[in-house]
Amino acid sequence: MITFDAVTKRYPDGTVAVDSLSLEAPTGEITVFVGPSGCGKTTSLRMINRMIDATEGQILLDGVPVQGIDPPTLRRGIGYVIQQAGLFPHRKIIDNIATVPYLLGWDRKKARARAMELLERVGLDPAFAGRYPFQLSGGQQQRVGVARALAADPPVLLMDEPFSAVDPVVRTSLQEELLRLQAELNKTIVFVTHDIDEAIKLGDRVAVLRVGGKLAQLADPKTLLSEPADDFVREFLGHDRGIRRLQFVSTERLRLRTDLTVKEGATGPSDEPWLLVVNDAGRPLGWISGSRPGELESYGTYTHGRDSMRSALDAALLSPSGCAVAVDEDGKVAGVATREALDEALAEAADG
Ligand SMILES: Nc1ncnc2c1ncn2[C@@H]1O[C@H](COP(=O)(O)OP(=O)(O)OP(=O)(O)O)[C@@H](O)[C@H]1O
């Protein structure tokens, strides 16, 4: 566990970057620091591995004050990932990943074997091992940055806006990769971002900081969205706070109709305005309407019980029928969530 105990950082010019910050980042969880530019996120993060020293108060690692640990020893147990990966441009990918094991005096063969293992772990082709950073895309470099931080298997990982320099699609896949890795590795992660969506997606706990380095709220994402502590947090969460809350509402209890699907080629007259056509394997092909029986219209799917109500609503909005297609883990149609069913679920979510 990482503990901030009344930590203040005053820079020599008098700027108070962090003001009496007290919070805990529990072991095995992702704690996200989020807030507007200049609110002290990076300063807070860097005080953990002593790249910056606190002016007052203390930071404890499993109860031990970091001030008492010499920085090289401290950093051996703390992986650090930054924006744009910060790879050594003249070193091959494999040697970039093996940087810390080399520093720790591992033999070359063992360090390289570890690097190869990590390359695969972060979802990269082993063939990249012999390339140089400039021969990789930004997203791939970022994965190498994560692999490098994990190389010596540190219990703590500090991540400073690691995904903010890549496009939104790559960013989403990096976020998912991190969550997948974390489910296996259970590191204690402190993650800095200015993007509230990223904070909500990744954080077990989210610390919202305001300019002046003061903690505005520390809560799990669901609580943050439903009970913002004050106007600053409310505003920072943005106007679509309600929609975001749906991310935490399960589709398990969403009522499905199974009488609105027809096999391909078996369509006949129906009283229903829309029917969903499925193939022999039970996968969706498209909607047909009574008014245009020959044409298959687009549809949106969500995985029933696994995806959230936000996904179900998104799926409904992608279908001209206004209904969401519920599929199982194999992509087979489990049923259809009609507007009425979605309405009921939304009313329930608003109550709860
Ligand atoms: N070396 C320094 N000397 C003086 N002031 C500094 C120094 N480094 C940072 N600051 C100031 O401290 C405050 C907090 O900076 P910090 O980089 O921690 O914020 P941040 O929340 O990470 O911002 P951003 O999202 O823009 O990176 C800012 O007002 C910044 O200008």
Image (cartoon, rainbow, N blue to C red):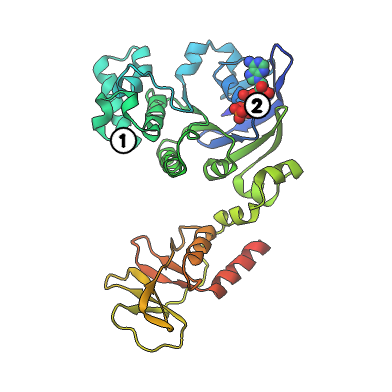
Badge 2 is on which residue? 40
Label 1, secondary structure: give it: loop
Pointer 2 residue Cβ closer than 8 Å to ligand 1: yes
Q: Earlier in the sequence, mark 1 or mark 2?
A: 2
Taking 110 as reference, is 158 left or right?
right
- Tell me where residue 106 sits by quadrant: top left
Image point (39%, 22%), residue name: 87
Where residue 66 appears, as percent x and y from the top left, is 58, 17
In this view, the residue in front, 110 or 314, is: 314
Q: Quadrant of ligand 1?
A: top right
| Camera-side residue of 231 and 136 | 136
Q: In the figure, 289 relative to 322: above or below?
A: below
**Quadrant housing the N terminus:** top right
Q: Judge: label 1 CB < 8 Å from ligand 1.
A: no
Q: Amino acid at mark 2?
A: Gly
Q: CA distance from mark 1 to mark 2?
A: 33 Å
Residue at 36% x, 76% y: name it: 295
In the rendered image of this protein, does residue 176 appear above or below residue 41?
below
Residue receiving disc 1: 124
